[in-house]
Image (spheres, rainbow, N blue to C red):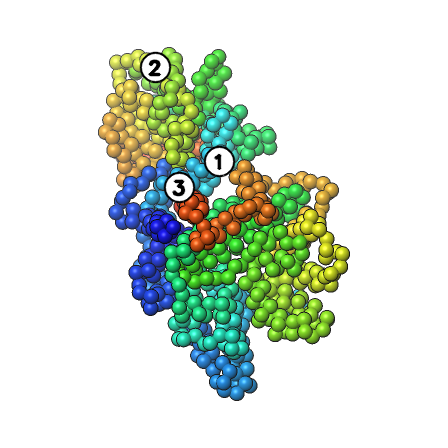
Amino acid sequence: MVFSSLTFLFVFLPLLLAAYYVCPNRGRNAVALAASLLFYAWGAPRFVLVLVASGLVDYALSRHLPAGRGPDRRRKGLLALATALNVGLLLYFKYANFFVDNLNAWLARFGAESLVWTAVALPIGISFFTFQKVSYLVDVYRGTAQPARNAADYLLYVALFPQLIAGPIVRYHDVAQQLIAREHSRERFFTGILRFCQGLGKKVLVANTLAEVADAAFGAAPGALPCGWAWLGVVAYAFQIYFDFSGYSDMAIGLGRMLGIEFLENFNRPYVSRTITEFWRRWHISLSNWMREYLYVPLGGNRKGVVRTYMNLWLVFLVSGFWHGAAWNFVAWGAFHGFFLCLDKAFKGTRIARAPAWVGLPVTFVLVLFSWVLFRAETLAHAVAYAGRMVDLFGAAPETAAAIEFGRRHAATLVAAFALCFGPALKPHPFDFMRLEPARATVGQAAARFAVAMILLVWSASILATSSFNPFIYFRF
Amino acid sequence: MKRLLLTAALLFSLFLALPLAQMATGWPPDYPLAGVETPAGRPPAGVRAWWNGTMQTDFDAWLGQRIGLRGLLVRTANQIRFTLFRELPKRSGTQVLLGRDGMLFEKVYVDAYNRSGQRPGSELRNISASTRRLQDRLAADGIAFLLVIAPSKAEIYPEFLPPEADVAGRPGRRSNYENFIKYLHRDGVNVVDGHALFQEWKREPGAPRLFANGGTHWNEYGAARIVAEITGRLRELTGKDLPTVAVLGAVTNRTVVGEDNDLGELANLWSARPLAGPQVHPVAEVRPGSHVPDLLFVGDSFVFTLTNFMDRHGLYRRRNTYYYYNREYFWPVAPNAPLDKRQLDLLAELEGRDAVVIEVGEYWLPRVGFGFVRDLLKTYARFDAARAAAETVP
């Protein structure tokens, strides 16, 4: 189930909120857990078993991880085992097809027979919940958090529906206390509404509209794509992915608040970054935090010399790229970002690094655009061909140009997206406008924000309702 | 502030709960949607359906069609899109394009105007020849035959097509109509050629519009002029004193008749009226005859504008219409019913008829009669063979 669906919006959410708030405090975790499992099972019933079974194993092993529960070597061994089980599940479900396909390609190259293999279906959200589970195991091992009180609490941490499918990646120590006791207040619920509606609007009104342009551009044969359309397509995609992903995070944060849980922010206007390093401090923050805490630092971080620091940085981004998808273009995407991060580090403190915003910002944005080509293209070859069209500024226009629809709605949405992403000087910025703290606001300010939220909600819901309505003028037969 | 926060939470929850409540109680009343869609089946129940995910998928589809206040939500989305961006829904099964001066076009007709869906000449030649065979066979039984070609709006008013119709890129090859009409004339099929007539009438000085802005079919005025042609030709073909129609002029106002804003309705805005445009109605005179005919029509959706006018003016004593040769409409009795072709006795249906009129839109020319011509020729062949066999038995 996805948040931007009628089933979620008009069936799941109202029933969940009713059940959750009718239930006394002590039963609310049970309601949230049952709802989360139902939410997950709606799309993938069989994989709920994988989620629950692996969660129970984690929980059982985690009981022996805290310091003082046995010799350090045993604890370390159990942590390695538990982590390997989780990473193994991820490798199997997400990457087995990729490895077999590549192996078969090599075998074919040498004239050998291919391996017979039944493609493995991917459990939705496995990349996100695997990282969360590893976070729990490591936190408990390190002593930054106590083991969950019971298996149900732990499963709730892993499966809590707002963040289950697309993050933010919640580190266990950030929510451990909230799983035990949390505050349910009108203020929190109210800010949750504002945040949820903002996210829904970002997803349905902006991301989905720009996806039409991006899909058309990336769906066209690169040879039929004029240079301008190639740029338009990738710019549309850059805004699509930002509004889609950050919208989803907003919805998750909003839903969390409605249930009394605070998740950390996941995006902070990434396109105003002046360097790739800054971009990664603003883009998918929860992933960057996770990578730093559970991969970069354990690898040695910057403590083991310059060469290891660069290697660690690059490795982290290669893993990050591969985590995003099982294909070579994602690996290349990670390598691309890792390379520019290393460059940032190498030039830190020099005049280049101190370049003014009007230089740093567009250069970074263009680099990010090229990286999005790697991310969005179907294959590495497609990405190279597409990027080739982008840099072919003075080349001849294709004889038969691809037909890409770009109407007033697309233009207006693109302009709005551009203004929202590059207008940080706007006071108040529209995103901050919706991040109201009722305790510091007047009734008028709160009412105005609620009115905007309801407009976004009604508008988005009405668009969702049209998705199932494709009428014919008459029954012809 | 506390009161505001509580009110906000209640309003938000109310909005989320309202569609489900409306589904259960029917209140508040919804605003129905125009157009037809294939109904999604009730989701299957049971563990197996749940386990393999079909229940969830089917439930989503089922809910999408039945969610409370769907009409209001869809119309709201469409209205916002139209008001802000002058854009009509793109996902319709029947796609509608917004042309110049607010003229609406069905996309399939625009594609046909751009020469997609071309059929080979040999196929059209065979269709024309079978039509002629049917005409002759019916004549042998004293039944007149007339083929009415309904013009496409895109062909008659290409100057109103929207830029995205890409008329400039239109191939120069001949259309199905241009090829077909040549064969029909060569074979001597009785035709009321709406395409040629509309082109001619459009050029008349001060000519009123023959299609409404919001309609996909000929408007009431255009249809009345075609009826005048039909009645004149039938009088001539039957040799009987049948009633005829003369169109004396036109009145333009805002009153929408019948389906003259069907594309506007399909846009599903809060109100379809702004899309209807000016409506042209005929000033017509019926000249009575001593013989009121009994007619059988076969046709597509253009046929209704003709028969509505003819019904109102009592131009026949009985009329049946085979809509796409799949559903039957009766007059003077109102109801309609699916046509069970296995049970259908075509010869009995023709009993007492003065004429068979096949109406076909340009788009459907390769399917003239939608199977009726083929079935009737087969029926005649069987009947004639049986009669011949009976005559040879001593």
- Relative vertical location of residue A466 with respect to residue A26 in this rendering, above or below: above
User: Circle 1 marks a residue in which chain?
Assistant: B
Do pointers 2 and 3 mark residues of a single chain?
yes
Picture coordinates of residue A360, whole percent (x, y): 69, 52
Give the tally of numbered discs. Answer: 3
Picture coordinates of residue A13, whole percent (x, y): 37, 56
Question: A428 or A336: nearer the eye?
Answer: A428
Residue on which the image places disc 3 = B74
Q: Three-letter amino acid code at disc 3? A: Val
User: Circle 3 marks a residue in which chain?
Assistant: B
Q: Residue B9: in sight, yes or no?
A: no
Q: Three-letter amino acid code at disc 2? A: Ala
Q: Residue A287: in sight, yes or no?
A: yes
Task: Give the quarter of the image for residue B348.
Answer: top left
| Residue B206 falls left or right of residue B56 | right
Picture coordinates of residue B15, whole percent (x, y): 35, 48
Picture coordinates of residue B91, whole percent (x, y): 45, 42
Task: Identify the residue at horizontal 64%, vertical 46% (top origin).
Answer: A230
